[in-house]
Amino acid sequence: MARIAPFRALMYDPHLVGDLAQVVTQPYDKISDAMRERYYAANEYNLVRIILGKSLPNDSEHTNVYTRGQEYLNDWIASGVLKRIPKPAFFAYDQTYEVPGEPAVYRTRKGLIGLGHLEDYSSGTVFPHEDTLSGPKEDRLRLLRATRTHFGQIFMLYSDPAHSVSAALQPLRQEKPPLEITDEYRVKHSLWPVEEASLIQSLQKVFAHKQLIIADGHHRYETTLNFRNECRANMGTTGPDAPHEWVMMTFINLDDEGLTILPTHRLVVNLPKFDMKEFIVRAQELFNLVGFKFFSQEEKHRKFEEFRRELKWVGEVTPTLGLRAATTSNFYLMKLKATVNLQALLPELSEGQRKLDVIILHRLILEHCLGITVEDVRAEKYIRYVREMEAGLEAVDQKKAQMCFLLNPTRIDQVRDIALAGGRLPQKSTDFYPKLLSGLTMYSLDAG
């Protein structure tokens, strides 16, 4: 099953860079243009210069964001800004955070950072749960070729109902963490190195019987598989313990009470010949529509709260979606009719997949009712994604979107069951919160 290993991490020297919160970043795919500018201004050693550097007008095949990333990395290692720890270690990694949308509700998610052995999906050890696109993988592959370093961890889930890993690490967590920072989302990140040989061996034995599910980092994992295959071809060897056979991961128990999945809502934008009345007629073939009509701003707020509660409660019983359209003064609940034969409509999908709200949205609403094809979705031609429900509704109110479809979060047991059965979910079906910071630990293939 899963092979894990400690490693000599590259880490920032706080004596040279100052506040570590000013040099680490959110994952590269969560960094907006505004965030990148803020990271650039925060500290001259901010990791964004390497993982998502700025393009320049005179960039070429030989001088570009990837080669500059390599130069920054080499300079920071040479100057001592980045240092390798003396001996291999795992890291206990805790994230304490406030649950978005639930004021004053705090959770702590407990993880373990280490190296995970790269496995093809066919091995039955590592399981994806979402589809990927080729563009992001090519971008990350070029950076990996240039730097030969992993700056963020793949977020991996494993099942441990007995919480044996957490129990083994609990004595460490009683001590003050040697590294602790708070990020821009007020998430507190705490790290403890795990260096004791007997503890390392016991953790490896536990994971030897585990299967892993990719929660976040599908593109990076598949990029690393491609890079591994390149290295094997170039070296003419498939040695299982070569540096390119491993990638940095954070392992989190899917039975952990601190695990939170947020929904990602969908906006429909610039859809030609959109007709709300026609959409309603087509949707009513498959859904019962319940309207929450309002006539004033005060009533709108009250109806929205009522609508949001119903979306959550009804969604626990039957596939249910929320809808707000620019041409109406309604919030709509769209409840799938009990008479709809999902097996006949979606015969190629498993029973577990057919029950997912996000599948219902993509296949029955976007495709069937609106004519938005799979290719359109992949190209994000008429679809935009938004985490906050209020931001989606505001986009509709400001006529920046024609429709906003609101979802309940996908449950962790649904992710587990579909992934282990070999199924996939559409992109952005899950939003695991909070994100794992990049730059806390780094894995250099040349670290020795």
Image: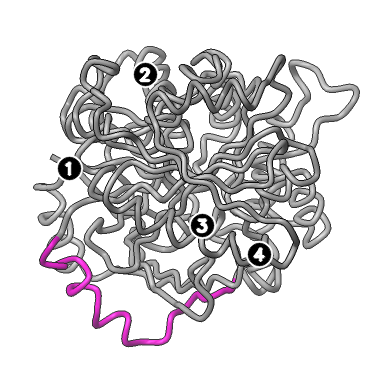
- Read off the magenta span: 161-182
Q: Position of residue 391 (x, y in %)?
A: 68, 52
Q: Is residue 177 magenta?
A: yes
Measure the C-alpha gap from mark 3 to mark 2: 51 Å
Vertical placement of residue 256 versus 426, above or below: below
Question: Does residue 243 appear to the left or right of 289 in the view shown?
Answer: left
Would you say the residues marked 4 and 1 are in contact, meaning their CB atoms lie under 8 Å apart?
Answer: no
State yes or no: discs 4 and 3 in contact (Cβ < 8 Å).
no
Q: Residue at x 53, y 76 (%)?
A: 103
Q: Amino acid at mark 2?
A: Asn
Q: Earlier in the sequence, mark 4 or mark 3?
A: 4
Identify the mark at residue 301; answer none if there is no mark.
4
Q: Is residue 19 above or below residue 153?
A: below
User: Which residue is disc 2 drawn over?
Assistant: 229
The quadrant in which residue 163 appears is bottom left
> Which residue in the protein does label 3 denote?
307
Asked if the residue under mark 2 is in contact with the one under mark 3, i.e. CB atoms within 8 Å, the reply is: no
Judge by depth and name the residue closer to the eye, 74 or 54. Answer: 54
Figure quadrant of residue 89: bottom left
Quick check: 340 left or right of 181? left
Residue type at the position of mark 3: Phe
In which quadrant of the rendered image does the C terminus lie? top left
Residue 294 position within the rendered picture, expressed as x and y whole percent measured from the top left: 66, 56
- Amino acid type at image mark 4: His
Question: In the drawing, what numbered circle is on residue 211?
Answer: 1
User: Which numbered disc flags the more N-terminal residue, 4 or 1?
Assistant: 1
Left or right, 437 with reference to 16: left
Kindly report the distance in space between the C-alpha atoms of the residues bearing marks 3 and 1. 39 Å
**Element carrying mark 3:** helix
